[in-house]
Image: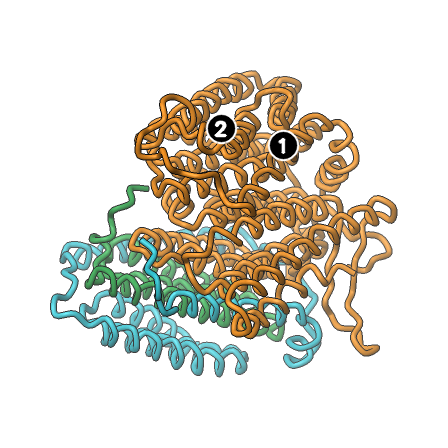
Chain colours: A green, B cyan, C orange
Amino acid sequence: MTSTWYLYMGFCAALLFIGIYCLLTMKNLIKLFIGIEIISKAISLALVTGGFVRNNLALAQALVITFIVIEVSMVAVALAIIINVYRHTGSLDIRKLTTLKG
Amino acid sequence: MILQIALLIGLVGFSVLAILLRDLLKAAISLAAASIMLAMIFFRLNAPYVGVFEISVVAGLITVLFITTIALTKSPSDVKESRRPLIIFPLFFIAFIICDIFIMKALLQAGRPMLPGSPGTQPFGVVFWNERTFDLVGQIAVIFAGVFSVLALFRPRGDKHD
Amino acid sequence: MIFPFIAVPLILASFMPLVGRLSKRFFPDLLANLAFLFLLVYSVIIARQLAVEGPTISQLVFLKHDLNIRMALDGYSAFMLMTISLVTLCAGLFSINYMEHYGSKANYYALLLIMVAGMNGLVLVRDLFQIYLFLEVAAIASYGLVAYGLGRDELEASFKYLMLSAVSSGFILIAISIIFALTGGLSFTSVAAGVQALGQKYAVGFCCGLFILGFGLKAALVPFHAWLPDAHPSAPAPISAMLSGLLIKVSGVYAMTRLFFNVFGMNPALGTVLMWAGTISLVVGALIALGQNDIKRMLAYSSISQIGYIILGLGLGTPLGILGGLFHIFNHAVAKGLLFLNSGSIQNATGTRSLDQMGGLAKRMPLTAGTTLVGSLSIAGVPPLAGFWSKLIIIIALVEAKQYGFALVAVLASIVTLWYYLLIQRNAFFGKLNETWRQVKEAPFWMSLATVVLGLICIGVGIFFAFLLKTWIQPAADALTAGIRLGLPGLGL
């Protein structure tokens, strides 16, 4: 059982790496959001794998379904912001959004 | 087991494709394909409910939202991504995978960290509706938050705020 | 009965669109602020009941059916509930006048109510995944609220905030899934029992590291603070007050300390990491705040600095340190809320946030100037205002624990804090009246009322701090120092 968990967590870590790489290097707003979607897939896989090795898939599925609902809500808000940004600046380039210096 | 590993590699492959493709539409479709791979992995792990939910919501609804946004924000000048990150990505990725395999091997040899026992005994329906009822309240709140935020972001602007 | 804390804001939020159809501004204002007032009064009643009966668990019973909605209330939760309700009421009163020209007030109040419901839910649950769930509820509502003005700066700030917050939520959830795979449970008691029985130092330590990454970003600890100086100034003033005063503390500091003290058990390594993180935040925030020209940006960096103070106190782990940290949570929430609301008054009257362009406003806006002075001195730690006592307690705790280096840094940072707050006072309020502002008037009634209430609380808490410490903050500190809860006896959680 344990080796199965490690196998799946290895793939989950790879997905996390891909998602964070996307967030660090991509410049298109929608591509950045695809990075977050990939991180969400990693999280769903991690949760279900956790349930699988604990033999408690019912609980894991309830958690993942709740998480997917949260994710849909977040996607809706993020895409609404992206559309509004497009209306303001006419492009989806994050390099144009540099007025605030952070 | 072989099929599981193939599906996992397919999932990672489609995700890599989703960030390497330059056309946004193809990237969104690649993301949907990755979702379908993930759903098949879930089915084979004996988690059918989340598999169905994943296909219908993530591969369905979210992909539709993405395509709607891409259609609404089409501009004649596309965002010029620099080529360098896309070329050095495979190097980083392979390096990461090698580190990953080494760490996993070391952890495997270190012993089993799990706490034994306590499998869940209830079927999914009972767990979802009875045991995690509070999560439903949270889900309703999250849906409200999303709906009201989108309404606020798209409200008709009579008097413009600077 | 503690379910109303979550149910009342949610139900009212769902009715807000209908109410908004009926009347554009009167009914939404009235109903929302009545709800906030109800929450404040009810939290005081519940806190009294807590003092009499001890920690309670409430389970909802609906039509003779046991619904599995369990919430638990102990000293720490009651304390946070009161802080949340107080600052929310004042922000709500302030919004009556301030949000006039933003439009669509019913929608705004609905989002504000959902954010409050999320924060209330976060402090009342006893389950790892539900903490994450209510954290996301409050966060998604805050994304919409930060971008509420629909200007270019707001949208940029909200987008960056969203990206970073989503990544941090991802880290939190990965840690939760690893804990779930290791111990098989999600509620505090089962995870605590599992972690004790497992004895796996490295795996649990890795999860704690992920939690510090995730919650530290929510609490704006350096080096994860980059989103805060953009998001808090761009939001409308009452939302800045709510975010800076409440959200970073509830979703960052409360969640982290609740998990580390009551579930994982605070060990010296964890404490040291927190203390270093707090000190670095303290110093970096204070130094960068000195060079700011925009008043809200300066206040945002000051928030980063004060959160460093709170984490320093809480990371120390001794009972006195925890007491100081919790007291500072309350003081900073009240005072920073007050300061952000006042910056909104200034922006409303003069249309600018730049300190260079302001000058001598004290003659035209005496109430605003007075309350800003009270709030600034409270945070900077000047006796007899409230902030002085909480900072003193933290410094005494540090000295008692023989951490002289940290104590020295804390004292020096306090001096820098005083310096830049006096800069605000001098540039904005005192000095010669800038000719452009000759015609400005004092802030409208509700805005002034909200800020005066908060100012009076700063002064009142400063004078009566001993009484408040004993009755109100000590139970909260006791709840944290009680350590790992391996099952509240007889309550079956």
Left or right, C331 with reference to A13: right
**Which residue is labeled 2 in the image?**
C279
Quarter occupied by the N terminus of chain B: bottom left
* Residue C362 versus residue B99 in the image, above or below: above
* Secondary structure type for disc 1: helix
Q: Residue A63 got which mark? A: none
Kindly indicate the quadrant of the structure image that contains residue C423.
top left
Q: Is residue B84 left or right of residue C461?
A: left
Q: Residues within 10 Å of mark 1 (few under 14, many from 20)?
A: many
- Using the image, determine if residue B22 lies above or below residue B45: above
Q: Alpha-carbon distance for marks 2 and 1?
A: 25 Å
Which residue is painted at 51% across and 45% down in the image? C444
| Amino acid type assigned to the residue bearing label 1 in the image | Cys
Q: Circle 2 marks a residue in which chain? A: C
Asked if marks 2 and 1 fall on the same chain, the answer is yes
* Residue B139 appearing in the image: no
Q: Nearer the viewer, residue C468 or A60?
A: C468
- Amino acid type of the residue tagged 2 in the rendering: Thr
Q: Is residue B142 above or below residue C457?
A: below
Q: Which numbered disc covers residue C458?
A: 1
To which chain does the residue with label 1 belong? C
Residue A13's place in the image compared with C477, above or below, is below
Counting from the top left corner in percent of width and height, residue C77 is at 70, 48
Residue at (25%, 64%) from the top-left corner? Answer: A86
Give C14 or C389, whichever is nearer the viewer.
C14
Using the image as rendered, state which of residue A1 and residue C466 is in the foreground.
Answer: C466
Q: Earlier in the sequence, mark 2 or mark 1?
A: 2
